[in-house]
Image (cartoon, rainbow, N blue to C red):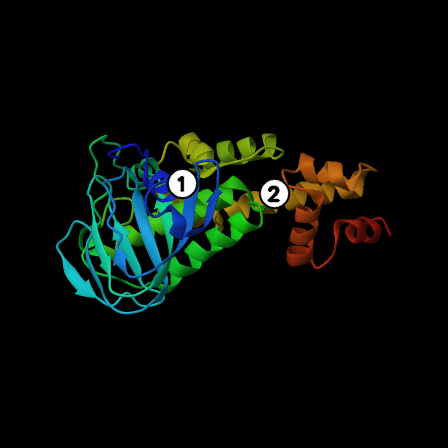
Amino acid sequence: MSGDYADHFDFLSRGPYAQFVVEKRSVGRRPVRMLRTAQPAGNFSDPAQPDVVLYKSLRSEGHTVRDLGAGRVRHRFRKGDFDLQGPGVANHIVAEGSHELIDFILPIEAVREVLDDPRPGFNGDFGRLHAQPFRDVFLEQLCMSLWRESEAGNPNGNLFVEGVLVSMIAILSSLADRQSATEGGPASPMPLRTLQEIDSFIEANLSKTLSNTDLSNLARLPQLRFARAFKAATGRTPHQYVLARRISRAQELLAAGDMPIVEIAYACGFASQSHMTDVFRQKLGVTPGRYRKEVRG
């Protein structure tokens, strides 16, 4: 990043546009950082920065003249539209009316991992997505799930955040027609031995934070390929599978002894007793306390 700023988050937080930042958030072990801004008409061009920035429009009045590295265009940035800024390129943005945005900063390291391109020089090029606004319902749902997750204090854990981040990058890649070996064709289930190793690892570490990176490294697969292969083998995403194991362990402990429910929650990797209670209500239709009473008759 040029000048005195480390990255886009730092530039908006401390730079000339800081007064227009309404809210700042961060979530996950490898954090996805987010900023909501409310800006008037004017020039809001940014210097080059190291990560991929996904802009989501919340409100826009008038047109915008912009160049995010794929040529200068004038367009109407409507509510629900996305724009995508790649790393290493200074942009040109002149808004003809007031507007509100959420900037989602996707770490370039995560982009390299998901796209299975570890080259230090990889420039995060998503092709045509840098040229014009685009829309995608599923991408919007994922973005807002991160926003809500950060607001709630990350109750679903880092594995959930990483799963959402991986899905966002995969959607961007697909939308940009960057078909790669990790995306093309039907996924093949992983070997049984590998699945058994992963299951044993999950069982041995249920009380800890488990990430997609941990599991994909164990399977010796890039994250996106791992996620697809794991779902093909189990019928569940890694997050769904781990959550099911946490619930199962909690059921065993509730039925087997008198360990306090709060201790069971932490022993099974839930963020808190209230988090476990919410999950039990959602998945089983009862609270942990009620489940203990019912199973013991």
On screen, residue 21 above or below 219 = below
Instruction: Give the crowd class for mark 1: few <14, some 14-19, many >=20 residues within 10 Å.
Output: some
Whether residue 87 sits left or right of residue 136 in the image: it is left
The kind of residue tagged 2 is Arg
Locate residue 276, reporting x and y percent. Answer: 68, 47
Task: Give the numbered dot on residue 190.
Answer: 1
- The reply to whether residue 11 is in sight is yes
Mark 2 — residue?
245
Q: Which of marks 1 and 2 is in front?
A: 2
Callout 1 secondary element: loop
In the image: residue 162, left or right of residue 257: left
State the residue at coordinates (25%, 46%). Answer: 46
Q: Which of 273 and 102 is in front in this view?
A: 102
Q: Is residue 167 visible?
A: no
Nearest the viewer among 67 and 45 is 45
Residue 3: x and y, percent? 25, 33
**Residue drawn at point x = 73 percent, y = 41 percent:** 252
Query: If the image is split into quadrants, where does the N terminus sit?
Result: top left
Between 15 and 297, the residue placed more toward the observer is 15
Secondary structure under the numbered disc 2 in the rendered image:
helix
Position in image of residue 151 (x %, y %): 54, 50
Q: Distance between the residues labelled 1 and 2?
A: 19 Å
For the residue marked with disc 1, what is the amino acid? Met
Q: Residue 29 carries which label?
A: none
Earlier residue among tags 1 and 2: 1
Image coordinates for residue 230, horizontal then vertical, percent: 43, 44
